[in-house]
Image (tube, rainbow, N blue to C red):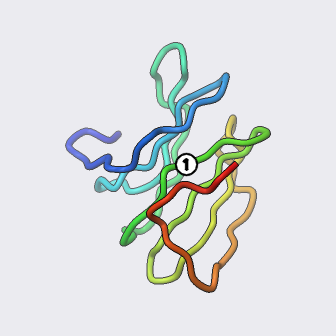
Amino acid sequence: GTSGGLIDNAPAAVDSNGVYFVSEAEDWGVFALDLKTGEQLWNATHEAAASASSPTVLDGSLFYLLDNGKVQLHSHHAESGKKNWVCDLPSASVNDAPVA
């Protein structure tokens, strides 16, 4: 869970299935909650990172930038949480959400 953690990236992304957010808590990662019940659907945890962007949802995929010593763009299937891909970026700022 995310109790006692830090959620400092806003806004969360929302689609017809869920609410998605990045948490910089002990269990650092991206989380998906059921839009109707608030139950956790899935999470994808990462090693602690310097910073992350707010997530963006487009065509059933979730995207966010992560800086853990190198900047990466991550993509997950929004419904299942399965990782689609990760792309290393030469340089970028993770202060903004990827634009959909």
Q: Position of residue 38 (x, y in %)?
A: 45, 21
Identify the secondary structure beneath mark 1: loop
Work out whether 30 lies above or below 69. above
Q: Residue at x 68, y 56 (%)?
A: 75
What crowding class fits label 1: few (fewer than 14 Cα within 10 Å), some (14-19), or many (20 or more)?
A: many
Image: 50 above or below 4? below
Q: Residue furthest left?
A: 4
Reading the image, the residue beneath label 1 is 55
Q: Quadrant of residue 3?
A: top left
Viewport quadrant of the N terminus: top left
Of 93 and 75, the residue lying toward us:
93
Residue located at (52% from left, 82% from top): 70
- Residue at the image position 36 percent from the left and 72 percent from the top: 50
Which amino acid does the dot numbered 1 rest on?
Answer: Pro
Residue in the image at 45% along x and 76% along y: 68
Q: Position of residue 6 (x, y in %)?
A: 26, 49
Residue 79 at what x, y percent from top left?
Answer: 69, 35
Looking at the image, which residue sits at the far right?
A: 59
Find residue 37 and report its horizontal and vertical position in percent. Answer: 49, 14
In the figure, is residue 71 to the left or right of 25?
right
